[in-house]
Image: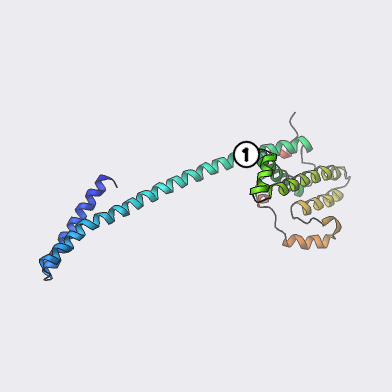
Amino acid sequence: MPIHWRRIAWFASFTIAVVLALWMRNSDYGWPATLIAAIAVWTVLPLIVSQICAAIVLGGLHWRIRRADLTDNFVAAAKSQEVVSQRAIKFIQNNWGSLKDLPTSLIPVIWVTVYRSLEIALTVEAGGGSRALLKNTLVGDRRLMPDLEEATLRIQFLQKMLPVIRANKTDIAKATDAQLVIDILKWGILDAASMSGIKRTILRQFAKADPMYKMPIPLEIGEPRKP
């Protein structure tokens, strides 16, 4: 506890002890009882105040430490998201060029699918590749390998379907195939190809999309590929 706090606590306890002694004498308490009570207050009260002050100081210190940690984590997360975003933009541009010719409702699905897939791939890459997969399988939640396999299948599905959609000669045919991709990748209706349109519409009402669909899409993925 800082020295000025100690002085304040000492003088405050001394004042309280004197007031207590005067009150006890006016209430006809004996000198022994008055002296014992006054000395107890004078000696014990500063200790209590010092503990309270120490708790306040440590609480403030811990709060600043937690705030600094949260700030560092936020900065690291922001940098990681920026890296994934840039890689996803380049991947889309290199594989499919501009997406402006595709149905508007399909573009967010392409973006989220590629972003999430590369997010998993970069996590594996940062952890040492196969070493990260082995570690997660042995001592982790065993989700990294299945997640990576699913991400790979999603990218392969896009690589297969986007040329098909672009090859369609009518907007209706493009929209039909695009909705199939949306139902599978966004809404998780894996058997959509074998379902009727009505059943898929009903299932969409109960499905939950990735929260990332609420975020803005980079304008770069609608631009022509840069040489």
- Image color mode: rainbow
Is 182 above or below relative to 23?
above
Rendering coords of residue 223 (x, y %): 73, 36
Location of residue 11 in the rendering, given as x and y in whole percent from the top left corner: 19, 52
The answer to whether residue 129 is left or right of residue 26 is right
Say which residue appears at 35% left-offset and 52% top-offset.
56
Q: Quadrant of the C terminus?
A: top right
Q: Residue at x 73, y 62 (%)?
A: 205
Does residue 15 sit above or below 82 in this rendering?
below
**Res 218 visible:** no
In this view, the residue in front, 180 or 59, is 59
Answer with left or right where residue 191 lies relative to residue 30. right
Total numbered circles: 1
Q: Quadrant of residue 121?
A: top right
Question: Label 1 belongs to which residue?
Answer: 82
In the image shown, does 75 or 52 lie closer to the viewer? 52
Look at the numbered disc 1 and give the secondary structure of its residue.
Answer: helix
Image coordinates of residue 198 in percent, x first then y, are: 82, 62
The single residue placed furthest to the top in the displayed view is 227
In the figure, is residue 121 to the left or right of 73?
right
Disc 1 marks a residue whose amino acid type is Glu
Q: Nearer the viewer, residue 41 or 189?
A: 41
Q: Residue placed farthest to the right in the image?
A: 169
- Percent across and percent down for residue 206 are 72, 62
